[in-house]
Image: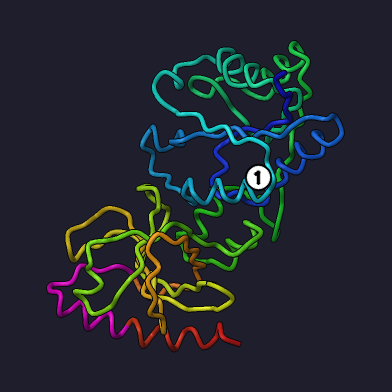
């Protein structure tokens, strides 16, 4: 026998406080009506499919981990491709919602669906009534006197305001992933680094940062190079961290790095030697900056 669900749908990029409120609503309904909970999301995101300038807050790895921590019964990830894009609002409703056995649906008041975002809350309400689905429309969620949105979180991260971003996320901003083998550039620079697998996606900010890692009940600080490596003509997004006062083999282990503050922008240096000098300066600057986080 197929389960019935209380569900919500969206990108959930950031899993911020507004997203968490939607999930709270479906969990309340599930508990009351003996339903299971489901989050329907997309990969790639629509803005990635259309190649808009908008970039990610979280990797799929982090998004799924955060949703699982909220004790969701099922996460349904839909591939957003040309066939999916072409669906009318009514086709979207039938194929994406009715087929998922949804009995309760919670969405934000700005929710749009179907080709060219033609479907609005009015149409969604009509379709839900016709198919005996209870619809919950969530008003804007406000925190720190701001409407909580992924757009605002992106703007704050682009300004490297991790403190304000964390208030909207309900947690410190961090990026996680498994440590993988890189190109051994760290050894070449006499600065070993842990390279994180970040799903080969583009994020909404980059630079060189002071970060913090909690590992086995110990706390370590690190220098995080996040983004391209222009000195080596490598313009893919990557994350590599030089962990201060740490010398262990952590390949294939999961690591979560909390971002604390920016050290500098990324720069294309004329030589590896110039970069080495800058890295030594980065280490000195990082040790000065971390003093304010050790208290």
Q: Is residue 15 left or right of residue 29?
A: left
**In which quadrant of the rendered view does residue 177 lie?**
bottom left
Confirm whether the magenta stretch covers residue 273. yes
Magenta span of residues: 265-281
Which is nearer the eye, 166 or 214?
Answer: 214
Q: Residues within 10 Å of mark 1 (few under 14, many from 20)?
A: many
Question: Count the marks: how many?
Answer: 1
Residue shown at the point (54%, 45%) measured from the top left? 13
Q: Quadrant of residue 53?
A: top left
Identify which residue is drawn at 70% across, 56% down. Answer: 143
Residue 113 x %, y %: 57, 24
Image quadrant containing the C terminus: bottom right
Q: Is residue 281 above or below residue 110?
A: below
Can residue 206 be seen from the camera position used here?
no
Is residue 20 in view? yes
Q: Quadrant of residue 283?
A: bottom left
- Say if 152 sits above or below 187 in the image: above
Q: Is residue 257 above or below residue 192?
A: above
- Residue highlighted by disc 1: 19
Q: Residue at x 38, y 80 (%)?
A: 247
Q: Position of residue 102 (x, y in %)?
A: 70, 23
Q: Quadrant of the N terminus?
A: top right
Q: Is residue 169 left or right of residue 239?
A: right
On screen, residue 209 versus residue 168, left or right, reads left
From this view, report whether residue 218 is shown above or below residue 8. Answer: below
Q: Secondary structure at mark 1?
A: helix
Q: Residue at x 46, y 36 (%)?
A: 45
Please state the horizontal and vertical placement of residue 268, each as a whole percent of the image.
20, 67
């Amino acid at each position: 026998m197929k389960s019935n669900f209380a569900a919500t749908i969206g990108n959930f990029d950031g899993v911020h406080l507004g997203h968490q409120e939607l999930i709270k609503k479906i969990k309340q309904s599930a508990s009351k009506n003996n339903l299971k909970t489901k989050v329907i999301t997309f990969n790639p995101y629509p803005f990635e499919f259309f190649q808009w300038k908008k970039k990610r807050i979280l990797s799929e790895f982090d998004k799924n981990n955060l949703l699982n921590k909220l004790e969701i019964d099922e996460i349904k990830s839909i591939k957003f491709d040309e066939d999916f894009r072409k669906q009318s609002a009514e086709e979207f409703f039938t194929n994406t919602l009715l087929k998922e056995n949804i009995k309760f649906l919670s969405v934000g008041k700005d929710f749009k669906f179907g080709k060219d975002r033609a479907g609005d809350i009015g149409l969604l309400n009509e379709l839900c009534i016709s198919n005996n689905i209870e619809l919950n429309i969530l008003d804007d969620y406000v925190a720190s006197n701001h409407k909580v949105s992924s757009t605002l979180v992106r703007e704050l991260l682009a300004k490297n305001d991790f403190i304000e971003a964390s208030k909207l996320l309900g947690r410190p901003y961090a990026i996680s992933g498994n440590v993988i083998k890189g190109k051994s550039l760290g050894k070449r620079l006499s600065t070993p680094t842990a390279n994180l697998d970040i799903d080969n996606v583009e994020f909404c900010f980059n630079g060189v940062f002071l970060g913090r890692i909690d590992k086995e009940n110990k706390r370590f600080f690190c220098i995080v190079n996040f983004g391209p490596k222009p000195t080596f003509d490598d313009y893919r997004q990557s994350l590599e961290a030089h962990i201060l006062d740490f010398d262990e083999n952590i390949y294939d282990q999961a690591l979560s790095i909390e971002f604390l503050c920016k050290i500098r922008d990324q720069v294309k240096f004329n030589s590896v030697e110039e970069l080495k000098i800058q890295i030594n300066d980065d280490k000195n600057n990082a040790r000065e900056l971390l003093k304010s986080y050790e208290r």
